[in-house]
Amino acid sequence: MSTDTANYGFKKDNEDEFYNVNVVNANLDKIDTEMKRIEDIIPTVSPTDSVKWLGVVAGTANALTATHAVITNYSDGLGVSFAANTNSSAATTLNINSLSAIPIKNSNGIAVSNLKANGVYTVRYRAGAFILQGEGVDLKEIITFANDAERNSDTIRTNVANAVNTKGVTISPNATWVDIVSKIEQIKTGKQVATGVLSTPTRWNDIKEVRGLKFQPSIILYENWYMSGWACGGFMFRKNTGAWGTLAGGNSFVVLKEVFVDGFNVTFAEVVKDQIAFGGLTNITWIAIE
């Protein structure tokens, strides 16, 4: 008595039964039906869905060539793997079946130039380039990034040091960050003040200039004396609505001529010639306030 197979129900005759062609044909029909069902549910595999092995490529270090029987054109998604024949030293291309040389790039769009001999690489074609897949660390990119960061750090450090200098604290533009921090702590808040002495004029109409202040003064005071000890008084100049003027009295020896972003200069008036003839003037002490 015949039996059926467990999975597809094919008829199996016993050894003592005669061969029955109808049973064989029925089994073949079942096989045909099942194979067609499986074929219909399995999606068609595109030539670009699988990665093709090119073997060890030929060509030069930076212009690789290879052949493959299945590849007839470059279409988006085409994937190939290959072993490099030597170290590359510049932007590298891959030409398959003499279709055309295609640049190999990393995921950032940067040309790959560091393939290593016998290294195995996988690339996929996309919009005119073979994009490296599963790429490792590009040491050249890391070094470039580090160098750029160092240069930017130098620029920032110099800018900060210069800014500290404008606050009246002397520091080198090449100072370290530790030095800069310590100098920043020395910056005083509020108005900046500077003092100095104008040397004795030798004649009237002499011009004396003060430069190098860390600020532009808004008030300038000065005081001078006759050499004989008689007081000649002092003057105060203040910036007022865009013009400088004398607001405090005494004998007008000095006329403020010009104020700079880092100082000022003054002219000794004609009256000075009388004081020089009388006995001369001592040095003039000044104070400037931010």
Image (tube, helix red, strand yellow):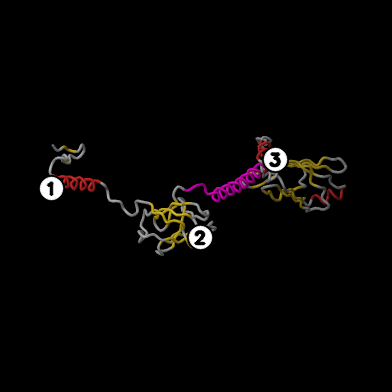
Please name the amino acid that badge 2 sits on: Asn
Instruction: Report which quarter residue 245 is drawn in.
Output: top right
Q: Which mark is residue 169?
A: 3
Q: Disc 1 to disc 2, how far (Cα)?
A: 66 Å
Residue 43 lies, in percent from the top left, at 27, 48
Span shown in magenta: 135-164
Q: Relative to 239, is 141 on the left or the right?
A: left
The residue sitting at 52% across, 60% down in the picture is 61
Mark earlier in primary sequence (3, 2)? 2
Mark earlier in primary sequence (3, 1)? 1
Please name the amino acid that badge 3 sits on: Val
Mark earlier in primary sequence (1, 2)? 1
The rendered magenta stretch, by its main secondary structure, is classed as helix
Does the magenta portion include 141? yes
* Residue occupied by mark 1: 21
Q: Disc 3 to disc 1, how far (Cα)?
A: 109 Å
Q: Closer to the observer: label 1 or label 2?
A: 1
Does the magenta portion include 91? no
Q: Secondary structure at mark 1?
A: helix
Q: Relative to 289, is 68 on the left or the right?
A: left
